[in-house]
Image (cartoon, grey):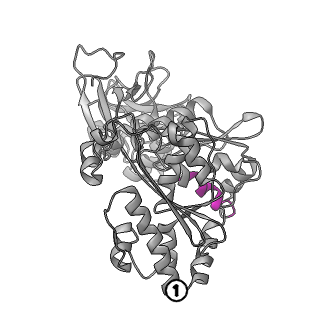
């Protein structure tokens, strides 16, 4: 017996790659108890269409599964077969996650030790670069009847284990498996089962402390790996250590993709105010710089606040700052770098009388516009040059736009709607929520400005029609 407990080598075919939205179309299981081997193979009615390219890849067509049993009718019998066994699969989080979700929908709890043969191959054969199933088949000369079918791929995993044991020795394979089966360190206040149930999908996660105090909100394209990274590095960084010591509960919300995760994280940090999220909190003093021109034609910066001015509709703003202090520091740095008058910039204070040289002029760091030694136009030109890199972008569209996020496998979409840099809400993918009183937000501006410069994969931009109702569900 290669391992210390019976094995269940599992492979699934599915309608796509999302463990909660997609469904199983075929199950292949090899049960191994020493010399006794039992095989279970069945098609499953996924109760949703199989995408064309999945049909082409697996050969499993919609008409083949139409008369197959639903998973819930197979669940109890399959669970009985899997209980107490080491769950082995190639890219095991995928198969394990799908099965856990299917059992959960059937009202059953499934928990098992999981061994991933991708990770096992990497550990046993570090000299090789590729460890996908096709690479293992070619490298070990595995013989299969039909690739991309559940039982055939499960057979490939079983043949790989036998090949590795024959080539490297059973002890070497067993020791490598023991290393991989050692569970990652989980903070003592957490339920291991909850951590195990984290999905490998995009979304936002929440850490709560005593009395459900929000500790931290984060986002990732892979919730499970990101959450576990907090705990695997809890001794390397003080912040991670404090979170690990304080966390008592984890929750999460899945998103369709990365853009939605970033957007949702920003919204939730502002609303929940977690104690370990410093960046992204709502700033009551969000401000910018605008320019006034006095009677002599001299431009004078003035700090304006988002609470008083609609930044989304105001042209010619420079910089977005979380406080007046940040804005004044930016003006001070500009004055020093471009020999600008600090009195004119409003930094030196109102005590400087008109026509009186500022302190900067006295120490030769101002060219003297304050004392009539420099023409206002020359000072204005240097000021505009200094401010140019801080200019807040004008809204480049005639009306609202939607960033459309699409799951390439399932075809599901969600539209994130914006107007004048304000996030209005999202629609599609099981929800529709819009803000009736949106306000300009620094994190949203930065996210959307960066997106317009470099769009994310799996997204597109759509200009909303002039008469298109915002609250209507997204069209199919």
At a point 24% along the width and 50% down the height, the residue shown is: 56
Q: Secondary structure at mark 1?
A: helix
Residue 460's spot in the image, x, y percent? 26, 38
Q: Quadrant of residue 310?
A: top left
Look at the image and tell me in which quarter the N terminus lies: bottom right
Is residue 394 something that shows in the picture? yes
| Left or right of residue 303: residue 134 | left
State the count of labels.
1
Most foreground residue, 470 or 173: 173
Residue 97's spot in the image, x, y percent? 52, 49
Q: Which residue is mark 1?
A: 168
Most foreground residue, 127 or 260: 127
- Residue stretch rendered in magenta on the structure: 226-235
Examine the rendered structure and indicate whether residue 380 appears above or below residue 176.
above
Examine the rendered structure and indicate whether residue 399 appears above or below residue 81.
above
| Left or right of residue 265: residue 339 | left
At a point 30% along the width and 14% down the height, the residue shown is: 469
Crowdedness of circle 1 by 10 Å Cα count: few (<14), some, many (20+)? few
At a point 64% along the width and 49% down the height, the residue shown is: 195
Q: Is the magenta region chiefly helix, strand or loop?
A: helix
Residue 96 on the magenta span: no
At a point 26% along the width and 22% down the height, the residue shown is: 399
| Left or right of residue 385: residue 303 | right
Look at the image and tell me in which quarter the C terminus lies: top left
Residue 83's spot in the image, x, y percent? 64, 53
Residue 301's spot in the image, x, y percent? 40, 33
Is residue 372 something that shows in the picture? no
């Amino acid at each position: 017996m290669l391992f210390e407990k019976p094995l269940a080598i599992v492979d699934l075919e599915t309608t796509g790659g999302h463990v909660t939205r997609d469904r199983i179309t075929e199950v292949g299981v090899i049960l191994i108890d020493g010399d006794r081997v039992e095989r279970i193979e069945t098609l499953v009615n996924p109760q949703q269409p199989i995408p064309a390219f999945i049909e082409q890849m697996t050969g499993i067509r919609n008409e083949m599964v139409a008369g197959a049993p639903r998973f819930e009718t197979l669940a109890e019998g399959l669970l009985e077969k899997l209980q107490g066994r080491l769950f082995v699969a190639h890219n095991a989080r995928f198969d394990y996650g799908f099965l856990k979700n299917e059992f959960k929908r059937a009202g059953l709890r499934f928990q098992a030790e999981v061994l991933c043969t991708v990770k096992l191959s990497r550990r046993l054969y570090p000299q090789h670069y590729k460890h996908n199933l096709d690479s293992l088949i070619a490298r070990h000369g595995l013989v299969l009847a039909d690739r991309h079918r559940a039982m055939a791929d499960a057979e490939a995993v079983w043949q790989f284990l036998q090949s590795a044991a024959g080539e490297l020795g059973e002890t070497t394979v067993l020791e490598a498996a023991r290393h991989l089966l050692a569970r990652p360190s989980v903070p003592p206040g957490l339920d291991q089962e909850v951590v195990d149930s984290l999905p490998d999908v995009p979304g936002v996660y929440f850490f709560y402390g005593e009395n459900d105090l929000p500790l931290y909100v984060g986002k990732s394209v892979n919730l499970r790996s990101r959450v576990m990274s907090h705990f695997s590095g809890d001794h390397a960084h003080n912040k991670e250590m404090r979170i690990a010591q304080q966390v008592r509960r984890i929750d999460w919300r899945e998103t369709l993709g990365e853009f939605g995760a970033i957007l949702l994280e920003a919204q939730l940090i502002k609303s929940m105010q977690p104690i370990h999220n410093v960046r992204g909190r709502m700033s009551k003093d969000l401000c910018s710089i605008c320019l006034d021109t006095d009677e002599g034609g001299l431009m004078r910066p003035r700090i304006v606040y988002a609470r008083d001015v609609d930044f989304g509709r105001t042209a010619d703003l420079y910089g977005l700052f979380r406080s007046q202090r940040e804005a004044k520091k930016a003006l001070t740095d500009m004055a020093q770098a471009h020999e600008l008058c600090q009195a004119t910039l409003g930094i030196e204070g109102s005590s400087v009388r008109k026509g009186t040289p500022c302190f900067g002029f006295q120490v030769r760091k101002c060219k003297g516009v304050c004392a009539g030694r420099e023409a206002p136009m020359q000072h204005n030109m240097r000021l505009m040059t200094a401010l140019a890199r801080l200019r807040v972008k004008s809204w480049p569209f005639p009306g609202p736009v939607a960033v459309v996020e699409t799951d390439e496998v399932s075809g599901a979409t969600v539209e994130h709607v914006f107007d004048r840099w304000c996030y209005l809400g999202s629609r599609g993918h099981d929800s529709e929520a819009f803000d009736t009183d949106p306000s300009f937000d620094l994190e949203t501006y930065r996210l959307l400005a960066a997106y317009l410069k470099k769009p994310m994969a799996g997204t597109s931009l759509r200009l909303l029609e002039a008469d298109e109702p915002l609250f209507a569900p997204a069209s199919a």
